[in-house]
Image (tube, rainbow, N blue to C red):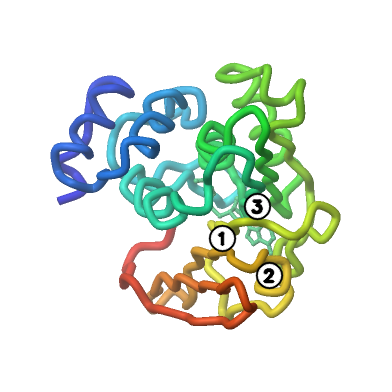
Amino acid sequence: MAWRCSGISNPDLINRMDQAKLISNPTVKAAMLAVDRGHYSRFKPYEDSPQTIGHNSTISAPHMHAAALESLAPFLFPGAKALDVGSGSGYLTVCMAEMVGPQGRAVGVDHIPELVELAKQNTKKDHPEFLQNNRVSFYTADGRVGFPQDAPYDCIHVGAAAYKLHDKLVEQLKAPGRMFIPVGDEGGQAIYVVDKDKDGNITKKKTMDVWVMF
Ligand code: SAH
C-alpha cells in the first residue's frame, strides 16, 4: 500500500496518498502540499518510506505523517498550540504550524541538538517566516517530560517510540486535547490516541500496529 504512493514531486506524492485514501481531510492535504518534503529529506523525499536524517534518526514515512495529521486534525484548528516531540527533520512540526495558522503555534523538541539545528535549517528553506514570527520554534529537550514552558497544548504528536505513556505529556494536554503516540519497542509498536475530554477525563485507544521503526 505505502510504496504505491511514491511520487516524483511533492504534489505527486500527496495526490497519490489522497487517491489511496491515506489522506481524507482537506486541511491535512493543503498542509502537506504547502510543506515540501524535498526540504526535509536529503534522500528520496517523494518516496513513501522513512529516510535517514543522520544521528541514527529517520524522517518518518509520508503515510505515517498523514496518519498523525489526520488523527490530530480536530485539534490543529486555527489558533491552536501543538507540541511535536522528537521533531527530527522538522517536517511534521511545520505541517502542524501550517494547519494552526498565523495565530497558532507549533513547538518541536528533539534531544539531539544537531537535529534541532537541522530542523531550523530545513524550515528556513521552506517557510523562513514561520521561524521569524515564532509560528514554529525548535528546542533541544528531553521530550519524555514534554515541554512545560509552552504548555498546555491542544495536541501533542510523539515521533519517537515511547515505552509507556508518559504522565507529564498527558498533563500538558489541554481539556479537550489529543495526543498521538507510538508505544512499544523493536519488537513492534502500536499507535495510541489519548484523548482528554473537556472535563479532564482520559481515554486511550490503540489505533494501528506499526512493524517498522520510524
Ligand atoms: N518525526 C520526525 C523524526 C522521527 S525520528 C520526522 O519525521 O522527521 C524520532 C526522533 O525522536 C529522532 O529525531 C530522535 O532524536 C527523537 N527522540 C528520541 N527520543 C527522544 C527524547 N527522549 N526526547 C526528544 N526527542 C527524542
Location of residue 198 with respect to 94 vertically, above or below: below
Residue 43 quadrant: top left
Labels 2 and 1 touching (C-beta < 8 A) = yes
Horizontal placement of 165 versus 188: left or right? right
Question: Residue shown at 64%/34% (left/top)?
Answer: 119
Question: Residue shown at 37%/26% (left/top)?
Answer: 33
- N-terminal-most mark, 1 or 3: 3
Between the C-alphas of marks 2 and 1, the distance is 9 Å
**Residue situated in front as seen by the camera: 59 or 102:** 102
Q: Quadrant of the C terminus?
A: bottom left
Secondary structure, mark 2, is helix
Q: Residues within 10 Å of mark 3 (few under 14, many from 20)?
A: many
Where is residue 196? Give x, y as percent: 57, 73
- N-terminal-most mark, 2 or 1: 1
- Give the labeled residue for mark 1: 158
- N-terminal-most mark, 3 or 2: 3
Where is residue 26? Give x, y as percent: 32, 36
Type of the residue with mark 3: Leu
Badge number at residue 169 = 2
Between the C-alphas of marks 1 and 3, the distance is 8 Å
